[in-house]
Image (cartoon, rainbow, N blue to C red):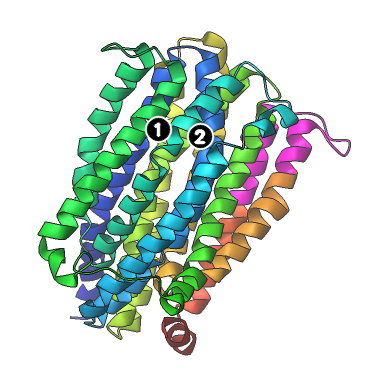
Amino acid sequence: MENNLPRAELAALLRLAAPLMLAQLTQMGMGVADAVMAGHVSATDLAGVTLGGNAYWPVLMLVSGVIMALTPTIAQLHGAGRQDAVGEVVRQGLWLALAGGILMVIFLNTIWPLYHWLGVDARAIPVARAYQHALSWGVMASLGFFCLRYLCEGMSWTKPSMFIAFTALPAKIALNYVFINGLFGLPAMGGAGCGWSSAVVGWGQLTAMASIVAFSRLKSVGVFARFSAPDPGQLGRLIRLGVPIGLSTFLEMAVFSFTTLLIGRISVEAVAAHQIAMNVGGLTFMLPMGVGMAAAIRVGYNVGAGDLSAARRSGWLAIGVAAGFAVFAAALVLLARAWIAAQYTPDVAVQALAVQLMFYVAVFQLFDDTQTTAIGSLRGFKDTRTPMWVALFAYWGVGFPVAAVLGLGLAGFPELGLEGFWIGLTVGLGVASVALVTRYRGLSRDAERIRRLAG
């Protein structure tokens, strides 16, 4: 019987992870569609979409990360059989989404002067500004969608995210084509059209997820049964748990985004090649990210049910699955790197630079994939502060300084340019991976600390 436990837990983990992996992969496909379709307009349009996205995504992940406190909270309530408390938690999460959304809209429409200050190639700035303005119209919808998605996932129901993502991707591609090229009487918007398509798709996703929550088996938790005013106590608990989650994600994404801004000083071709490599790395990252999200659900559920051995086992299985996938993904990227680059752009100069960067994409697979599953596993224990401090040290204390020194040729080092920036990013991910797996190893054995965190 004991020998069957890991197999049964792995099966439970993968049942949750498979829809999440597909949902994340499809969601990432929207970013790939933006990069490919903007890239076929011009390198300038691709660079503008890249710069605009590098301001948008870290802030979106910061706010959605705060809201992500819903997942471990609901998972532990579900494991403890307290479904009656779930609806109120989600309503408070929606208040957080509203507040964060307002701040994001302001940010997206005022950040663009930073590009001039950093000396970014001026050709890309108008595209980036227009792209961000368009994205701001869909922010509220995206954050509301995340709230309801985290409800489903916390209740161990991950298929709605997958089904909605499958519908959203073809809609996104079709709308990109319409807005980029100016069909049906619309003006041709180029790269900025990708932002408008994202806004429209975001509202569609929210409508679909709200319908699922209102009319499915989740109707019993009563999210829409009544109105709830902001509850300072409940909001405070979500903020204390969620802010470290949001900051962890923000600190990681921000180092990539700020590095992109520095790369923007080189040329639009360098930014375009960097975006292709980032896109490929992000695409392969979506699968282990889904496993990490499933680990948070399984670990949280098992903690709520009082089975700490199963909780520990869930995390280790997730980390092992991610490491195995990383080896496969690295080999695939190396073998297909030239073909991959050619799918993004016909520009030969951009292709050549992107092929060089694929080596680094392959190397950091192992680090990136294991660190995200370790974070998910720790999140299931409601340990969100340690990953935040690890992210601060690994990315900003190690990764970014190394990237800046090697990329810009500081402190007497030779200027390696684009490759120097990627060496620094890879080093930062390596430090984060080792630190987070070590933390998980220690915490998963400490029953008393787990109980304190759960309380």
Residue 232 or 147: which is nearer the viewer? Answer: 232
Task: Tell me which corner region of the image, top left, top right, bottom left or bottom right, holds residue 5.
Answer: bottom left
Residue 143 location (% of width, % of height) = 38, 51
Question: How far is disc 2 from disc 1 in space, using C-alphas?
Answer: 9 Å
- Quickly name the residue at label 1: 31
Relative to 37, say whether 419 is above or below. below
Residue 17 location (% of width, % of height) = 27, 56
| Residue type beneath disc 1 | Gly
- Quickly name the residue at label 2: 53
Q: Residues within 10 Å of mark 1 (few under 14, many from 20)?
A: many
Query: Is residue 369 at least partly visible in the picture?
Result: no
Residue 342 or 253: which is nearer the viewer? Answer: 253
Q: Residues within 10 Å of mark 2 (few under 14, many from 20)?
A: some
Q: Is residue 406 magenta?
A: yes
Total marks placed: 2
| Magenta segment boundaries in residue numbering | 402-429
Relative to 118, say whether 159 is above or below. below
Q: Is residue 361 left or right of residue 419?
A: left
Give the foreground label among 2 and 1: 2
Task: Tell me which corner region of the image, top left, top right, bottom left or bottom right, holds residue 33.
Answer: top left
Residue 183 location (% of width, % of height) = 29, 12
For the point 38% across and 12% down, the residue is: 187
Relative to 394, say whether 219 is above or below. below
For the point 20% across and 37% down, the residue is: 167
Query: Along the polypeptide, which appears first: circle 2 or circle 1?
Result: 1
Circle 1: element type: helix
Q: Quadrant of the N terminus?
A: bottom left
Does the residue at mark 2 contact the one at mark 1 (Cβ under 8 Å)? yes
Relative to 367, say whether 238 is above or below. below
For the point 59% across and 24% down, the residue is: 271
Q: Is residue 436 left or right of residue 226?
A: right
Query: Is residue 154 at least partly visible in the picture?
Result: yes
